[in-house]
Amino acid sequence: MSVMDSDTDAPKSKTPKKEKNKKKKDVPPQPDRIEVAVEVVHEHPNKTAPVVGYFPSGYDPVKNHASGSGPSEFQLYRHKNMSKRMQFVVRPPGSSVEFVGTSFSGEAAAGHRAMFALGLLDKEAGTLKIVPIAGNKIFRLEPKVKGVDTGDNEPANSTLEEMTPQQKIAETTAIWGTKKDIEKAKKKLALKQDEDPNSQRNLNVKMKNVSVKKSALQSTESHVSRNIPPYDTSATTPQEAYVLDKIILTGEWNYLEDIYKKLHQEEKADFSSYPTFVRNRVEGLRKIEDESEKRKLSCIFSYINHLIKFKDQHSFDVFTAKGHKIPNILRHKFSNTFAVSELRRLPPEKISLLISYVLVLTLFADNFKTYCTDIAKDLSMNVLAVRRVYEQLGCKLIRQKSSLNGFCATLSVPLTFPAELKDKKRKR
């Protein structure tokens, strides 16, 4: 019986070449992990938060102190009226140079969206305190010669001036808002341009080169006493007699495109919820080939619709307009113009003013020759009462024998009101 030699005849195990060539990698030592209790410390109005700054020049106050020259002097100056306006000064001992950083100029003036905080770790106590830093700014400490240019000139419009809530919302919307929100914010801004101080700058200089029509100014101002929309007695065409730009403001046209969009729908749009005056003129709108003219008239019809629905919503005995949605920009304007009371009702004189606005817009819609019947129905008024309002607006009433609609209101120029017309007849 033969016996196998274990040293020579036994099969040898083979080591893969990859394992032989594989070198052991040095694994870096893992830092010790500790569990801590986190405490967030909020800023206190009567206490100064830690100040954080850096030296772009490479100066190190710690090394300077270790060299035996003594500790540096640190001082923080704060504006007495605006607490966020600060100046941080570091003065090395025995040096003619000091390091100055501000929170209102230079690098600190650049806008940023981050919130800075300082973490204080106490390993023995096992706590981590998170504290805010002064002014939420990191001061860039620039070297300056003592007594020469030590104070930065504050800009006229500092970035640290307190922002109004509206400005904060606008800034946030511009950065994080959706496209729709940004467009809506731009439209609101367009209506408030006259409130912007920058838009009023150098106004006196600009007005020197502007010629003013005194008659137009007087007639535009007197519309309040007549309780009618803004007008111009010096106008030479019916289109200029009533100032459309002061009735429908520039920023409002984009909110009046509902009818114009309905006209471009593939399926036939439903206009049953609109006033009779509008429904009777939809087919005429469809036939207009000029798109800009079609859009303008559609917006005027939409404005008429919102005015009538606003009147109905603030009436005791009308409930058909309860679910109608008026754009916020128009609702706010209507509430101010027509002085809605605490009981959500319109005073009688403001109802008359609203009716005058509607009738003036019907003149624009019908090329300054309109009938009284359908709009009287929409306003829940007697046709005779509507005719009187048209006359108060300076229109002439002409009986149309060939028409079932009766009287036609026509606006002619120069604009003449009933009282002025009687005075002219007496003088004759």
Image (tube, rainbow, N blue to C red):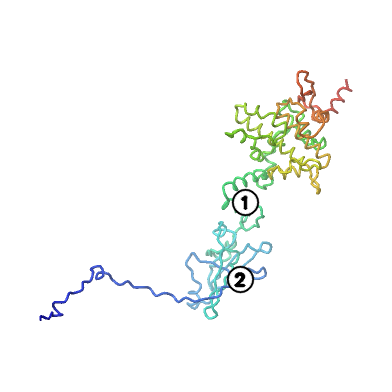
Image x and y of residue 302, in percent = 68, 36
Return the x and y of residue 60 as percentages of the image width and height. 49, 71
Q: Quadrant of residue 110?
A: bottom right
Q: Residue at x 60, y 48 (%)?
A: 181
Q: Does the rendering let one see residue 156?
A: no
Quadrant, the C terminus: top right
Q: Which residue is mark 2?
A: 41
> What amino acid is at disc 1?
Ala
Q: Residue at x 62, y 51 (%)?
A: 170
Q: Nearer the viewer, residue 14 or 329?
A: 14
Q: Earlier in the sequence, mark 1 or mark 2?
A: 2
Mark 1 surroundings: few (<14), some (14-19) or many (≥20) residues within 10 A: some
Q: Which residue is mark 1?
A: 170
In this rendering, the answer to whether 66 lies above or below 194 is below
Taking the spot 63% from the left edge, 68% from the top edge, the residue there is 43
Label 1, label 2: how far apart the Cα atoms are: 30 Å
Q: Identity of the amino acid at label 2?
A: Val
Secondary element at tag 2: loop
* Front in this rendered view, residue 10 or 292: 10
Local secondary structure at mark 1: helix
